[in-house]
Amino acid sequence: MHRATKIVATIGPASSTPDILLKMIHAGLDVVRLNFSHGTADDHRQRAETVRECARQAGREVAIMADLQGPKIRVGKFENGKTTLEPGQPFILDAECELGNDERVGLDYKDLPRDLKPGDVLLLNDGLIVLDVARVIGSEIHTIVKVGGDLSNNKGINRQGGGLTAPALTAKDMEDIRTAMSLAVDFVAVSFPKNATDMEMARQLANIAGAPYGVKPKMIAKIERAEAIPALQEILDSSDGIMVARGDLAVEVGNAAVPALQKRMIRMARESNKLVITATQMMESMIHAPVPTRAEVSDVANAVLDGTDAVMLSAESAAGKYPVQTIETMAAICVEAEKSEHSELDKDFLDRTFTRIDQSIAMGALFTAYHLGAKAIVALTESGSTALWMSRHWTHVPIFALTPRVGSERAMSLYRNVTPLHLDTSSDRDTALQQAIEVVVSKGYAARGDMVVLTVGEPMGQPGGTNTLKIVRVGDVL
């Protein structure tokens, strides 16, 4: 069954062996996420090599995403590993404290006292602990515990409503970008960007570091700061896509605000011709259980119905007991949700103007395939732009993007409703079109007599050169 929505999965201790990873790819894994918050450069290198080898064995390309850690806004360590906070008690966050105790704890982010004032509310450990800021004295933040609980080493800190000044790119992130480029990753996810400048800086660093390896990754902005919301359009314009990172975002803006923000972000991304990944706790219960909760099934299905390009697994696949089953389950949910999706292609095209020839051809192919009931759209593409534009509009016609470029093939692994396939380049248009049809037929996506819509550029081999639309029946002479 053709599945339009892509699956991103984090690999970790539970999923780093070739055997498990190969099973995950066969189960439906499209993009592997390397979480640079954990592990060494050698760990990531070994995992990237395993991914490439397993993808080769599976006979298809699987993209790799490097997810940067971003600023560590966390408490330090406790001499006893943790403390228990009671409502009403005073507690101090001290930037100069080495080891914490029942009265105070240190900070990884030393500038936090400068960002705060009396009356601010701090949320620790994903909002499970709430502290009211009473006063700030030098390096010390004096607080009163509003909601208590156990606080252990290195738990995260957010300010309610956002507004912390920590830069999106740390020295560690810059080093990690260099490592990621040496691994030839396809996507870089930037944590906690506040504006377009953060994304532009990350892209520049990645392009410079990737130049010796011939790598120019797609840049994904993780939307997890409150101040990123009003800057969403400029962040979209400076990125190749966004991730709806619901964990930290929910802590800063409140859980209740996230579902509507998710829908808005997905809509804005698609309207801007950008990618969008929905992440965080999608199948959380499957870390320990072989089946998801009904609420998790609905969560994944609703993200699909919203139009997300991909749904993402974190701890479920990195450290959970059932990484393969989780992907199988998620894939099945996506397929069922897509069956019920209503296409509004004609409405999508109202009041739209297309100034580029290649974009006009892409939209014409969609419109034609939709109304003629074509079995497939086959796009011969160098850069993948034609496939991206087509994927921003939902039809039940699968899109097959054939390219001679491995980098384009991997990047298109994240495009909704696009199946990327490799096609050795040919300078003759009719030969290339015939080869494209043969590839799609050989893989079982179309059969003799099926109508197929083709797009191609003349002369061949020029990115952005798509200028021809052809409608054929499989088996006819081109």
Image: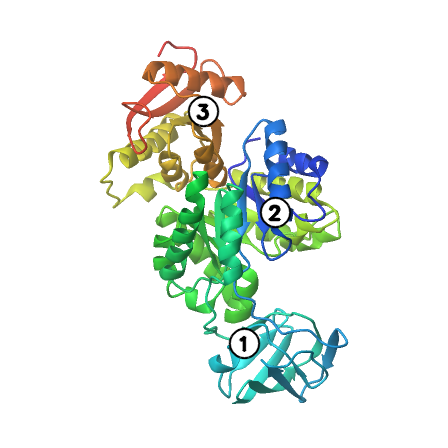
Residue drawn at (49%, 52%) of the image: 177
* Mark number displayed over residue 444: none
Q: Position of residue 156 (x, y in %)?
A: 60, 70
Query: Badge 2 local density, few (<14 within 10 Å), some, or many (20+)?
Result: many
Tell me if residue 146 comes above or below residue 367 in the rendering: below
The answer to which of 52 and 342 lies nearer the viewer is 52
Q: For the residue marked with disc 2, what is the amino acid?
A: His
Q: For the residue marked with disc 1, what is the amino acid?
A: Lys
Helix, strand or loop for disc 3: loop
Helix, strand or loop for disc 1: loop
**Which quarter of the image is occupied by the N terminus?**
top right
Please identify, in this view, whether the residue under mark 1 or under mark 3 is nearer the observer: 1
Q: Which residue is mark 2?
A: 44
Q: Is residue 368 visible?
A: yes
The answer to which of 267 and 214 lies nearer the viewer is 214
**Which quarter of the image is occupied by the C terminus?**
top left
Residue drawn at (37%, 56%) of the image: 200
* Mark number displayed over residue 375: 3
Are discs 3 and 2 less than 8 Å apart at CB? no
CA gap, disc 1 and disc 3: 59 Å
Residue drawn at (57%, 49%) of the image: 312
Is residue 147 found left or right of 355 in the rendered image?
Answer: right
CA gap, disc 2 and disc 1: 29 Å
* Quadrant position of residue 399: top left
Helix, strand or loop for disc 2: helix
Q: How many marks?
A: 3
Q: Earlier in the sequence, mark 2 or mark 1?
A: 2
* Mark number displayed over residue 110: 1
